[in-house]
Structures are given as structure tokens and as C-alpha cells.
Image (cartoon, rainbow, N blue to C red):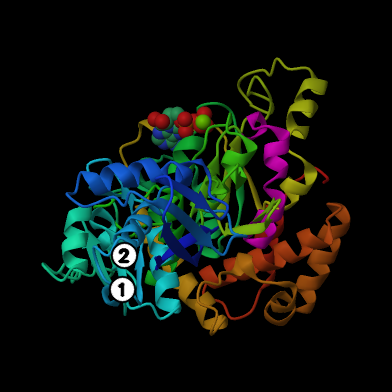
Amino acid sequence: MLAKVTSCALLGLQGVPIQVEVDTSRGKPMLIIVGLPDAAVKESSERVRAAIKNSSLRFPMKRITVNLAPADIRKEGPAYDLPIAVGLLLASEQCWPDRVDGAMFVGELSLDGSVCHVNGILPIAAAARERSISRLFVPAVDAGEAALVEGLEVLPVDHLSQLAAHLQGLSPILACQARPEVASAGLPPYASDFCEIRGQEHVKRALEVAAAGGHNVLMVGAPGAGKTLLARSMPSILPAMGIDEALEVTKIYSVAGLLPSETPLVRHRPFRAPHHTISHAGLVGGGHWPRPGEISLAHRGVLFLDELPEFGSRTLEGLRQPVEDGVVSIARSTGTLSFPARFMLVAAMNPCPCGYAGDPLRECTCAQSTVTRYQRRVSGPLMDRIDIHIEVPRVDVDKLTSDTLAEPSSAIRERVEQSRVRQRERFPGRPWMCNAQMGPADVREICVLEEEGSALVRAAMQQLYMSARAFHRILKLARTIADLAGSEGIKTPHLAEAIQYRPRRAV
Ligand SMILES: Nc1ncnc2c1ncn2[C@@H]1O[C@H](COP(=O)(O)OP(=O)(O)O)[C@@H](O)[C@H]1O
Ligand SMILES: [Mg+2]
């Protein structure tokens, strides 16, 4: 007796339908799983056996072969427990194919028969809808996440016996009606507000420009100058995230298994601040079963790297390609996987190991060679990809002790949002474009300079030994500054401000 049930595998963020074929034949009772299963899938046989028994169903005492097709895709994780169990019920005639055809099943079984959470439900549901599958059976805890996909009947399953009763036509499972609230979520409570930060007006201005155009920033300054505080306040001035962006980010968190079941949609821009001891795979993604790294978890948000030179140099070099392309490609023996990684890099560092190089009040105790070596830990090519380099000086005591609050984050965010509206109008049909993402063709078309401006850039290029990349990046940054000022064209002051954000050190 042969039974077929549809399930789904994940390749990166892509769901790929899998046929679970269950064959029972006479012979010594045993269960074999074939079709490139990993250890968790192989263990499935034990979970399914116990779950079926403990759900008052019959486990067929036959020779059982389970094939997961197509065989060239690696099957990982416990999500095939549920379709294998359904296949066994079909093969042993405890339910009939009419209710299984045209449906997709995913879920892990626990030994008592209850159905547990699996990762990646959102991309699986999206794949089901793309393939015109009308019904998706998911663990009840994941139903809200699956219901984010419109035009799909989502059936939440708590327990295998409940599913069996549904498939036998005894007691139907009700489809999940409640589509999670996807309208604008309002603003989250922020860790800190710009109004609490005294002084540092020019740093705040630089961060405003960065937020407006999605540019990368590096802050350099003595310990305690407020770099970490400023970076952690970034989320409070970032523009709100649209629903399409939110779904994109949610897919990544879903695959990484970081989505809380009570809030199935990531509504706010991510802010990721990994520690400098993070591994290469942890930062850019990868591992035996490729997982999204911190750069993908920061997609459409901020990746904050505090104490930048402390990160491993190989780890940092791994950032170069994704910073440029907005995706990270991970090569596997079975092919290449890619994860989106369109993040804004915010980095902070001390100028030298002791932290006081260039400080007007305190003497630096480092040898010049040590300072140079410290700064070299961050390679030139990475520095070149950071548009805004800004010094964070210590704040005056007078300013620190004054009672006047600075401009609140909400006012800054207002300006950032307005400049984003201008940017969106410029790129019709490309939903999330901001200036930092422009390609060379866009730069040529959009960042046209007046005569005075091009003379200024030419002089700066010569004096600062700038690369072609730096030239394009300056134009994009100047475009953002012009957008913040509400100016149609890029004027000389906008260019001058953009140029002064470039690093002084030749790269
Ligand atoms: N401009 C500022 N306004 C108010 N408090 C500040 C300012 N700069 C620093 N601080 C205080 O000093 C603390 C340390 O700052 P931090 O951001 O950790 O410095 P850094 O990362 O540059 O070493 C902050 O948590 C904050 O309490
Ligand atoms: Mg710090």
C-alpha cells in the first residue's frame, strides 16, 4: 500500500514542496526513511511510532519505507513527523486520501502525540500559496504566523488524535480565521531618546543623515564619550517599517527560529548588536545547516558593531560583499544559498588601545606603532564602504549638567521620514529604495552635479586619494543631505558636508 502526503523543505528562505511517500509491505516490522534525511529526520521514526500509539491509533506492524522526494534536497529538522504520521495513517487505512490531497502538512510530534512548533512556517506558507495548495496543516502555536499569508486555509493542529479525527471526518478542525493585525503597529518603546543626549550635535546630525539615506556610519572617540549611547538611540529615529518589509524580515526570523508565537510579525526595524567574540558563521550566516547570521537578522534595520577593531579580521572581511550587495551568498557542497542582508552598519571604536589618542585633556599612552596597528585591524576596503566617519569628542561638563533637553527623537524621525518619501518618489516601482542602495546607473542619472560642485569633488578626490567607490558614495550621501534639506538639486554645501564625512586616512 502506497500513500503520498505533501510537506515542505526550506532552502534558505525558500520553501520547496516535498512528497512524503509511505509504503507498507509484508516483512519484518521496521521503519526506514530514505531521501537525504538528516539525523533529526531519521529520529522521526521513533517519535512517530510513540505519537501514533499514544493517540489511540494503530501503528502498522509491517515493513515501512518512507521516501522524501525529491531525493537531491537535504531534509533537516523534525517538521516531517506530522506528514510521515499522516502517511502511515493513510497506508494503514485509518484515514482516506480525499482529505489529504491538495493539503500540505508540517509539524513536529512529541511522544504523547501533541504537535509542536517548527521553524520557517511563514516561508512554508508562502510556498504553499505559490503552488496553489489550498490547505496547510500547521502546529497550533504557529497558526498565527501561517495566517499572515493571504488566500490560504490554515488548519491549526494541537494533537495527532485531533488531526486523525479531522481526516476521518469525525470532528473537523476549524480553519484559523484570525489574521494577525498587520496594520501599522505604532512605535515601540525606545531604549533611549536623543533628547537625553547632551551636546554631540554634529554626531546627531551625522546619524540623522545616515538614517535618512541608509548610509553606514563609524563613530570614533574616547571611552565614555557616548558612542554606544548614540548608536543605541538610532532605532528611535529610523523610519517606520512598511508591511512588505515587515514580512520580509519576519521570514528571516521565522527560519532562524527567533519568532515569538504571540507576535508572529516583526513590526519594528531590527537592531542587532552582536558581541565582538562572534564567529564568522554567527555574523554572516552559515553552519552545517545554513542559518541566517546577524547581518541577515539586521536586514532592513541596524547592525551595530561596538568596539569594531576587536572583531576578528576574517569576520569583518566577511562583511564586505554583503555591505555592497545587500545579500549574502553561502556556498554549500549542494549549491549556493542566499539570505537577504540589506542593513545599515553602525560601528564604534576608540582611536587607540588606551582610548585617548587625540584627546585634548588626557594624554595617550600608546606608542605610535600600536595606534597604527590598532587602526589597521579594520581593513581599508571595509572603511571605504563606510560613508560617514565621525569623531565623538568628550562633552563639556557645562553641557552635561545643564537641564535643557535636546531635540527629541520624534522630531528627527519626522525629517527622516520626509526625506524617505522624497527618495521613494524618485524610485517608482522599487519599493524600499533609499539613496545608499542606488546602483551606478542610478547615481549617474540622479546625482547630477553643477559645475561648482564637480570642481569641488574633483579637488577632494585628489587630496583624499579617493577611490571610484568613494566618489559614488559621496554623491549618494550628498543626495541624502539635499533630500533632508528639501532641495531638488545637489548644491555645493550638500557636497561639502558629504565630503567632510569621508575618512581622512588614505584607504
Ligand atoms: N552626551 C551625553 N549625554 C548624556 N550622557 C552621556 C553622554 N555621553 C555619555 N553619557 C553617559 O556616559 C555613559 C557611557 O557612554 P557610552 O556610550 O557607553 O560611551 P562610549 O561607548 O563612548 O565609551 C552613558 O551611558 C551615559 O550615561
Ligand atoms: Mg562603548
Q: Earlier in the sequence, mark 1 or mark 2?
A: 2
Q: Is residue 80 visible from the viewing direction of this image? A: yes
Location of residue 3 (image quadrant): bottom left
Left or right of 217: which side holds 28? left
Magenta-highlighted residues: 308-328
The secondary element bearing badge 2 is classed as helix
Q: Is mark 1 within 8 Å of ligand 2?
A: no
Q: Which of 431 and 483 is in front in this view?
A: 431
Q: What is the spatial separation of the Cα atoms under label 1 and label 2, in whole angstroms?
A: 7 Å
Q: Which of 12 and 136 is in front in this view?
A: 136
Left or right of 293: which side holds 135? left
Give the number of the disc on residue 97: 1
Q: How far across and how far down the image is residue 463, in percent?
A: 86, 53
Residue at 37%, 54% in the rendered image:
409
Q: Which of 159 and 405 is in front in this view?
A: 159
The secondary element bearing badge 1 is classed as helix
Location of residue 439 (image quadrant): bottom right
Q: Is residue 493 above or below residue 112?
A: below
Give the number of the disc on residue 143: none
Q: In this view, does 398 lie above or below 468?
A: above
Q: Which of 300 and 251 is in front in this view?
A: 251
Residue at 22%, 42% in the rendered image:
112
